[in-house]
Image: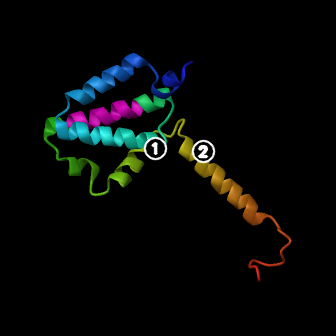
Amino acid sequence: MTFIHKIIGDKKRYRQYKARVEALPENYRTAIKAIQRYSYYFGGGDGDSGMQMLEDLADLFEQAAADGTPIREIVGEDPDEFAKEFFANYPKGRWIIRERDRLAKDIERAAGEDTGAGGAGTSL
């Protein structure tokens, strides 16, 4: 399996998604592309889960465009919060979840270990 296939899954499916995005009115297209770009940094899923997320995002924006729903009514005043809530519905394969869990476990383990320092603070 190629790296690209792992990231985007089926190329035909991805091309169909891209065509749907390009068919949106410009302001909706700009918004969905921004959310898609952000998903890459936030930790999108594996090929299938990632494509399902993008397809669902396209569904949301297509319906909003058809209904004339303003962009701010879709994403609210905090696009970061919207994106995080939206992405939370697609946890499969998301590296950020694994890393958050790993961080929490490592800190928990470290905090529970006796360092032999004889107290919580240090003195100089």
User: Which residue does the image show at 42% across and 43% down from the upper left?
Assistant: 87
Q: Is residue 63 left or right of residue 106?
A: left
CA separation, marks 2 and 1?
15 Å
Secondary structure of the residue carrying tag 1 is helix
Q: Is residue 58 magenta?
A: yes
Indicate which label's residue lies in the foreground, 2 or 1.
Answer: 1
Q: Residue at x 34, y 20 (%)?
A: 15
- Residue beneath the point at 16% across and 44% down: 69
- Most frequent secondary structure within the magenta stretch: helix
**What amino acid is found at the position of numbered circle 2 in the picture?**
Arg
- Please say if 115 is above or below 56: below
Residue 77 placement: quadrant: bottom left
**Residue situated in front as seen by the camera: 4 or 14:** 4
- The region drawn magenta spans 52-64
Residue 111 on image: x %, y %: 73, 65
**Looking at this rendering, what residue extends furthest in the left direction?**
68
Q: Callout 1: 10 Å neighbours few (<14), some, many (20+)? A: few
Dot 2 falls on a residue whose secondary structure is helix
Location of the C terminus by quadrant is bottom right
- How many dots with numbers? 2
Q: Which mark is residue 41?
A: 1
* Residue furthest bottom in the image: 124
- Tell me residue 12's x, y (percent): 38, 16
| Residue closer to the observer: 76 or 14 | 14
Residue 45 horizontal side relative to residue 27, left or right: right
> Is 72 in the magenta?
no
Q: Which residue is mark 2?
A: 98
Specify the amino acid type for callout 1: Tyr
Q: Position of residue 11 (x, y in %)?
A: 41, 18
